Image (cartoon, helix red, strand yellow):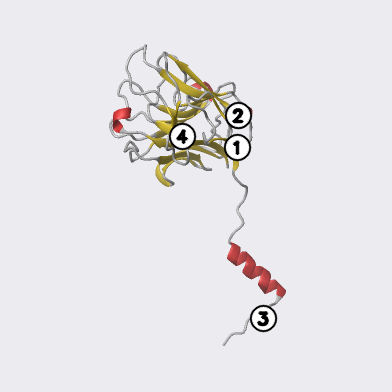
Amino acid sequence: MIIMRNHPMRVGLAAVLLLGPVTAGAVSQKLRYKFESVSNPVTTVVDDSGKGHTGTAQASNGGAVTVETAGYEGQGVRFPGVCVGTTCAKAFISAADSASLNPGTALFSFGARVRVTLAELSTDHGSNLVQKGLSSTAQWKLQLDDAVTGKPSCVVRTTGGAEAVIVKASVGIADGTWHKVTCQRTSTTLTILIDNVARGSALLASTYDINPAGQSVGIGAKSAGNNNDQFHGAIDDVYFNLD
């Protein structure tokens, strides 16, 4: 029989072993929209991260962002239905540019809960979910441009829209149920996760600089104008974190 005595050093070591390794750094939440206090139709959205990035609904052609009940938790938001042409209803949520949302070479994760059906996808245009920046600028973006199987993808670009890296998920999400879709940058890769499971990745150099300075955040589309890549489903729990 081995008898363990409560030696101070052994107690301290045991505590470390029980607690596990100490992680380096911590997630810093820079933006989060839970949509719990929005009106119907949506006008403004409180930033639940506490960082003050208030969202504003913008629309054209009679479009509106409306409350989705039930959301993933509580309530979410819904965007205009499928339509083709320049007179279609359009709407999205915009947040002003902030340097805190330009990751540069830092590690990050961003995404949303998404509910969409195949019937709500369009072969006429893409569907932008969450983004900062455009194809002609530095950019980070989560999109759903696959209208056949509903596979989302993560996109990042450097200055002037150069050197785009696109990671498409191996599975679709257009089944009418809520899915968590995340784009994550680690020290070596850009990965897309569906419901916390990695479904695709690409190499991303540690020097790859994503700095969409001067660009606003768009949710549900890139604008309320023509060719806005309008998303036609529901979104909840939008977030952007630096890791």
Of the two numbered discs 4 and 3 in the rendering, the one whose residue sits closer to the viewer: 4
The residue labelled by disc 2 is: 53
Q: Amino acid at mark 4?
A: Gly
User: What's the CA distance linking mark 2 and mark 4?
Assistant: 18 Å
Comparing 44 with 147, the one in front is 44
Q: Give neighbour class at mark 1: few <14, some 14-19, many 20+ (Cα, 10 Å).
A: some
User: What's the CA distance linking mark 4 and mark 1?
Assistant: 16 Å
Mark sitting on residue 76: 4
Please report the residue visible at 49 percent of the width from the left and 40 percent of the height from the top: 184
Residue 6 shows in this picture: yes
Q: Give neighbour class at mark 4: few <14, some 14-19, many 20+ (Cα, 10 Å).
A: many
Of the two numbered discs 4 and 1 in the rendering, the one whose residue sits closer to the viewer: 4
Mark sitting on residue 5: 3
Q: Earlier in the sequence, mark 4 or mark 3?
A: 3
User: What's the CA distance linking mark 4 and mark 3?
Assistant: 56 Å
Of the two numbered discs 2 and 4 in the rendering, the one whose residue sits closer to the viewer: 4
Q: Is residue 203 above or below residue 164?
A: below
Q: Is residue 215 left or right of residue 7?
A: left
Label 1: state its secondary structure: loop
The picture places residue 114, in percent across and down from the top left corner, at 41, 36
